[in-house]
Image (cartoon, grey):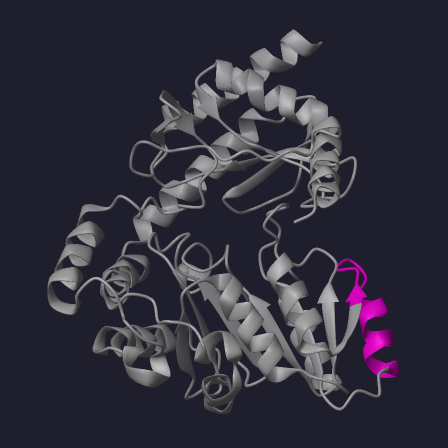
């Protein structure tokens, strides 16, 4: 690479630092959980998506060991060559039955949620089609749409009349509405019943990215169960490295959709399958998600406790009923300063800045878990109130 190109990269990086947008990796030196060791420092964490506290669950760890003993360390090939193991098949059948977006639904597992969304959008949409995406959608839905070469039509999630007008005006051969189910930086739920109705009226498919809802809402079955929705129009994506505690993702949908993904989705066809030991561990995790309702009850108790204690804070707490509790601070520098102040109190709560969130809405994304205790949340609230007093 010519020196001028290196200079341009260095200049761009310097500008990011000056704008308060530099990102830095933290190194965990402990297992994931509420109490972690980060860069050598013991901290109480409110940053993980381990909503049910399953990442360190002893039963899942035992299942992972069992899976390695039975299936080995790696898959060795893509699913369509010789990398599809019995553990994958068992997990997919269980996921399809658990989420059940429609009668006879099938499921397909992926190594990550990002791959899953790239696969399903690019397989279902192409030139001459149109994808209608909520402006707050996760980057992988947007990237999948751009790669698909379909027309990309954005809409405001709080203005479904706008979406309906754009659907009605579209002459696309195939129409797809794509939305997060729980918006990852705001914590609120998409209006899925209304979106299903729009999909019905305008003969569209509805892609639902339930990365932050699966395992948490709807008795663990996700946002479709929360709203009581079942229809062949829904293509459901759920992740398995958040509430399920392990890794990966899945798509559950009508058999014709799943078979289309198997036959045509490049991120599925040309990727080595995830290790079967992970699928074996995920079957154990799914059993806990299905049967251990008290975990979700503990999580919701922590959410209610935090929201009650945060009412007097000077920053805007968004109206989220989920484990994601966003505290909007404003400027990048102010959000970083508040995050640093909490770290001085022994807490890890990262600042989220543009382009992940809109300019002027940098925030702390407080992530709660069933593994947090009441005392943990009290410690967070005391630190936030202390930081507010110091900044007053």
First to last magenta residue range: 154-169
Quarter-of-image position of residue 75: bottom left
In magenta stretch: residue 209: no
Instruction: Judge from the rendering whether residue 162 lies leftward or rightward of residue 280; answer left or right.
Output: right
Given residues 289 and 283, the one toward you in this image is: 283
* Residue lying farthest to the front in this orientation: 2
Quarter-of-image position of residue 124: bottom right
The secondary structure that most of the magenta stretch takes on is helix
Q: Position of residue 153 (x, y in %)?
A: 80, 70
Q: Can the viewer see residue 200?
A: yes
Q: Position of residue 48 (x, y in %)?
A: 44, 40
* Above or below 62: residue 282: below
Instruction: Judge from the rendering whether residue 295 lies leftward or rightward of residue 57; answer left or right.
Output: right
Name the quarter where the C terminus is drawn: top right
- Residue at left offset 41%, top offset 42%: 299
Q: Can the viewer see residue 228?
A: no
Given residues 242 and 161, the one toward you in this image is: 242
- Residue at left offset 20%, top offset 57%: 64
Q: Position of residue 156 (x, y in %)?
A: 79, 60
Q: How many marks can you see?
A: 0
Instruction: Judge from the rendering whether residue 230 lies leftward or rightward of residue 333; answer left or right.
Output: left
Quarter-of-image position of residue 133: bottom right
* Above or below 144: residue 220: above
Q: Position of residue 335 (x, y in %)?
A: 66, 26
């Amino acid at each position: 690479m010519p020196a001028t190109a290196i200079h341009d990269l260095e200049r761009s990086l310097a500008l990011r630092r000056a704008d308060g947008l530099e990102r830095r990796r933290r190194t965990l030196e402990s297992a994931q959980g509420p109490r972690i060791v980060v860069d050598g420092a013991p901290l109480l964490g409110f940053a993980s998506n381990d909503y049910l506290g399953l990442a360190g669950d002893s039963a899942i760890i035992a299942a992972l060991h069992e899976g390695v003993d039975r299936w080995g360390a790696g898959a060795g090939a893509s699913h369509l060559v010789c990398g599809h193991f019995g553990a994958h098949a068992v997990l997919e059948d269980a996921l399809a039955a658990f989420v059940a977006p429609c009668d006879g639904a099938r499921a397909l597992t992926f190594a990550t949620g990002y791959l899953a969304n790239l696969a399903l959008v690019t397989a279902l949409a192409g030139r001459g089609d149109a994808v209608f995406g909520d402006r707050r959608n996760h980057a992988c839905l947007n990237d999948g749409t751009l790669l698909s070469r379909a027309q990309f039509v954005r809409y405001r999630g709080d203005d479904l009349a706008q979406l309906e007008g754009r659907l009605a005006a579209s002459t696309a051969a195939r129409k797809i509405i794509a939305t997060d189910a729980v918006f990852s930086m705001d914590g609120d739920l998409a209006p899925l019943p209304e979106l299903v109705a729009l999909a019905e009226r305008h003969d569209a498919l509805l892609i639902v990215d339930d990365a932050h809802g699966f395992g948490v809402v709807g008795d663990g079955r996700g946002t479709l169960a929360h709203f009581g929705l079942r229809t062949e129009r829904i293509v459901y994506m759920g992740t398995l490295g958040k509430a399920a505690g392990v890794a990966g993702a899945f798509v559950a949908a009508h058999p014709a959709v799943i078979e289309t993904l198997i036959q045509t989705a490049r991120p599925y066809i040309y990727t080595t399958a995830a290790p079967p030991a992970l699928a074996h561990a995920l079957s154990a995790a799914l059993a806990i998600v299905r049967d251990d309702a008290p975990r979700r009850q503990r999580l919701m108790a922590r959410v209610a406790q935090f929201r009650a204690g945060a009412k007097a804070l000077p920053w805007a707490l968004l109206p989220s009923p989920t484990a994601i509790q966003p505290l909007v601070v404003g400027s990048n520098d102010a959000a970083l300063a508040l995050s640093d102040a909490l770290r001085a109190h022994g807490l890890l709560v990262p600042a989220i800045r543009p382009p992940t969130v809109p300019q002027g809405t940098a925030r702390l994304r407080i992530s709660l878990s069933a593994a947090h205790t009441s005392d943990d949340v009290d410690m967070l609230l005391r630190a936030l109130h202390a930081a507010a007093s110091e900044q007053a």
